Amino acid sequence: MELKWNRHVLILYDKHGDEKVAAALKAHFEKEFDPCDVVMIDSESYSVSLVFKLRQLLYKISYKYFRHYLAFTSKEKEKKEEKRVQELVKTGGEGENKKAKPFTIKRILNIMRRFEPVMVLCTTPEALDLTLIAKNDLAMDYRTVGVISQFALDASFVRPKVDGYFVENPEVKKRLMNSGVIEERIAVVGYPTTFSAESFDRQLKRKALGLTGNLPLVVVNGGDYDTYTLKRDVIKLMEKKNDYYLMIIAKDKKLRKYYTKLPEFSAGSGLMNDVLSDDILDAADILVTVPDTSAIFGAFMRGVPVILADGVTSLENQIKSYLVKRALVIPSRTPDETLYGVYEILDEPFRKNEFKYRGQVYVRLSVNDIHNITPQIENDGVAKLTNKTN
């Protein structure tokens, strides 16, 4: 990699979930700040390879077969983190000196030594932990930033030694403040995106997907769960296959085979894809999804109404609560409610336009919030990258 400038900003992100967020942050920093190299480093690169692969395998198995256990452990983790945060509030942030095993921290130490960054942005709690430990071990003075791009707060992000936070919405900011984080250290930057509002030919997008008729397109996205949590919803939607095209987003070959063998499935109106791409969202009329922030925000951008099913983890349920309270989505708890929500959008143009408008307004406000990074938090938090502060 060619390094052009002396100052480096690192973005440590989750390889399987935050790449678009990291790319948007990189684009904004390179545009707004004085010359500096913004380097994106994914979770596979800064984690121990074997540990990373085993963890990903465990996650996949849990998403597929042990969702009840996943729900239980997420609740236990939430309780543990809330207790930890309460202790931090009581002690004013004192008493938390985390240490990592040498083999766990080795890659992060090497990265920090190589780049000598002025700022490190972390999109996951794990990356933030490792970055803080490395900062202490190497006695460096780079700024640490927690990037919370979800609609809700994962309490694992709350660390007393973090210099600042970039958060998606004011409610996350409020929760951080209630956890003892100083207000001036928190910047509401919306959901970082490089999305362009340029118009596109929707009919061409539909034809590229093999949609030649005029039926609306309903897309079902299962997120990490590959629609295993939405199987009954999918089957219910298949029953009305003559009223719309149905696209199912699922990577799992076994699950895809299961759907195609059902008597309700029709090759003419039933479509499969392994990734919820931008092109699919461009062509969609309705998105049925689990609480997946990236997918939901992508739908809002395009004015696509969202029917939101229940999540599995505590964080996902918090995301659903946030969106439902603001009437940005249609909530669903059962297959019948999902089907009813689809027809509510298809048969009532007023409701469709209402959710389209709300989603697009939310996106405009969020995109505008990215500029809150620029008038930064000065010496108390995340230092602005200009010659004046170096």
Image (cartoon, rainbow, N blue to C red):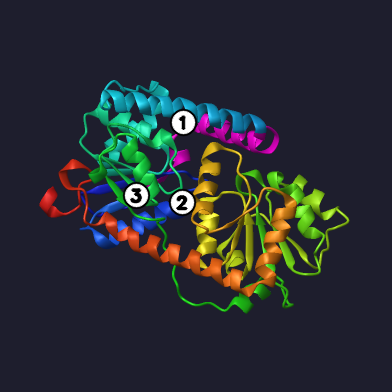
Residue 97 placed where, x, y %?
31, 22
The crowding category of the residue bearing disc 2, from other C-alpha atoms within 10 Å (few below 14, some 14 to 19, many at least 20), is some
Left or right: 328 as drawn, with respect to 211: left
Left or right: 286 as drawn, with respect to 169: right
Q: Quadrant of residue 69?
A: top right
Q: Main secondary structure of the magenta part?
A: helix
Foreground of the two, 91 or 284: 91
Q: Nearer the N terminus, badge 2 or badge 3?
A: 2
Residue 194 placed where, x, y %?
41, 63
Q: Amino acid at mark 1?
A: Val
Residue 296 placed where, x, y %?
54, 57
Magenta stretch: includes residue 55:
yes
Label 1 near label 3: C-beta < 8 Å? no
Q: Nearer the viewer, mark 2 or mark 3?
A: 2
Give the residue at mark 3. 39
Give the residue at mark 1. 48
Q: Report the span colored magenta.
A: 40-67
Give the residue at mark 2. 19
Q: Amino acid at mark 2?
A: Glu
